Image (cartoon, rainbow, N blue to C red):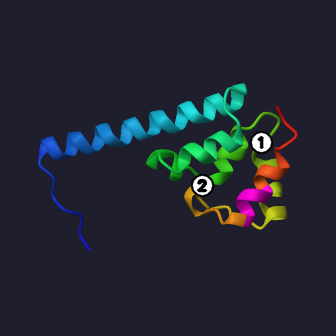
Amino acid sequence: MALPELDPAQRQAALDKAAAARRVRADAKQRLKNGDLSLEELLTEATTSEPLAKLRVCDVLESMPAYGPVKAERLMTDLGIASSRRVRGLGARQRSALLATFADRP
């Protein structure tokens, strides 16, 4: 299936929308890293924010303090979360297991 041809105004609107979504995701990851946002707050915000709902779980975990790619992948494997899973696609058990893992953190 071929992509539709966009006129310059439609193309620019799509580029602006994509840039805004990247800014929202980057801001959320930075707030997680700084401790200004908890995992529970991020998951709650993701229910109403399309850009946050499309954020990969591995990116969220890697943004947590003291978590890098290896530790995040290990945790996802232990919790049975696929590496391609997005925040919106988390099941109730996966979500509660993630929240329980970070419950004792500030």
In the rendered image, the quadrant that contains the C terminus is top right
Residue at 68% x, 51% y is 58
Note whether residue 2 is visible. yes
Residue that carries the numbered disc 2 in the rendered image: 87
Residue position marked by numbered label 1 in the rendering? 68
Comparing 69 with 45, the one in front is 45
The quarter holding residue 16 reads: top left
What is the crowding at mark 1: few (fewer than 14 residues within 10 Å), some, or many (at least 20)?
some
Please state if 12 lies on the left or on the right of 16 as rendered.
left
Which residue type carries mark 1? Answer: Gly
Q: Amino acid at mark 2?
A: Val
Residue 24 coordinates in the image, percent (x, y): 48, 35
Q: Left of 77 or right of it: where is 54?
A: left
Decide: few, some or many residues near mark 2? Use Cα within 10 Å; few <14, some 14-19, many ≥20: many
> Is the magenta region chiefly helix, strand or loop?
helix
Say how many tags the image has. 2
Residue 20 appears at what percent x and percent y? 38, 36
In the rendered structure, which segment of residues is drawn in magenta? 93-97
Mark pair 1, 2: CA separation: 18 Å
77 lies above or below 19: below
Which image quarter holds the N terminus?
A: bottom left
Q: Position of residue 88 (x, y in %)?
A: 55, 58
